[in-house]
Image (cartoon, grey):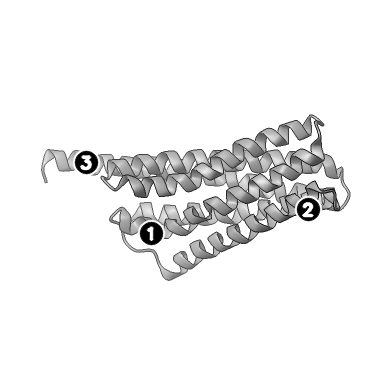
Amino acid sequence: MSMTNVEHADFTVQEREATMSIVAGGSFAEAIGGIAAVVLAILGLVGVMPEDMAAIATLAVGVALLLQGIAVATRFSNLFSHTGKRLADAAELGGGMGAEFLGGVAGGILGVLAILNIAPTTLMSIAIIVFGASLLLSSITTYRVDSLSSKLGQTTLSAGQMLAALAASGIQVLVGIAGIALGIIALVGVSTMILILVGLLCVGGSVLISGTALSGTVATVLQH
């Protein structure tokens, strides 16, 4: 093997290790945010300071989506460019995570404003719509992760892993649509706080599932 090939191989290994670490960190943050949102939403639904619980859960989901979007979009865009793959492939994956990034920023800001008691119910209803749209737009990313191995020249994922990625993507689509619907209904004043909490419960669960599925699938791909 020539020196150039050895250097390229070492660089590729370093890129994979760096990507695994950052994706794992982003997915862990997403999972924590999802768990926090689920717990807070449940507490709110049983009557424990529902407005406060909803506001904090909104911020938690926003931060989780933001961190995951930054981690995956940045590292996979770099990985695609260094392995000589088509820019369109990197843009497709990064674009899905870009939706999570933007949704996380918007939702996080709305959550902070809600915590500061600035039109909380209205802003949280809008945040649910934003989260739903973000999950819907980024669902393609979760589904497309199962094809990363062939694009990066790695071994093919098992049928179970591909099914898990597809299932996570399907859940994101359903929750995304539900979140948009719940947010819109809450905006018009129909059982506003209950719908906000139910929306956050659904979104938090989806974030937890998609983050776990993504980190597991990516780790498998990059370890081969």
Residue under pointer 1: 147
Query: Which numbered mark, 3 or 2, is in the foreground of this view?
Result: 2
Point out which mark residue 176 bears.
Answer: none
Query: Which quarter of the figure has residue 120?
Result: top right
Task: Return the disc, 1 or 3, that comes first in the chain's sequence.
Answer: 3
Q: Gap in Å between the C-alphas at discs 1 and 3?
A: 23 Å
**Residue 89 position in % (x across, y down):** 36, 50
Per the image, label 3 sits on a secondary structure element best described as: helix
Can residue 197 be seen here?
Answer: no
| 15, 177: nearer the viewer | 177
Query: Which quarter of the figure has residue 63?
Result: top right
Question: Quick one: which residue is furthest to the left in this view?
Answer: 2
Please give the name of the residue rendered at 20% of the width and 38% of the height, measured from the top-left corner.
7
Q: Give the position of the C terminus as an image quadrant.
A: bottom left
Residue under pointer 2: 185
**Residue type of the residue flagged with mark 3:** His
Per the image, label 2 sits on a secondary structure element best described as: helix
Query: Counting other residues with Cα less than 10 Å from the Cα at mark 3, is it few (<14), some (14-19), or many (20 or more)?
Result: some
Residue under pointer 3: 8
Per the image, label 1 sits on a secondary structure element best described as: helix
Please give the name of the residue rendered at 49% of the width and 52% of the height, measured from the top-left corner.
215
Question: Quick one: which residue is furthest to the front in this view?
Answer: 188
**Residue type of the residue flagged with mark 1:** Ser
Tag count: 3
**Residue type of the residue flagged with mark 2:** Ile
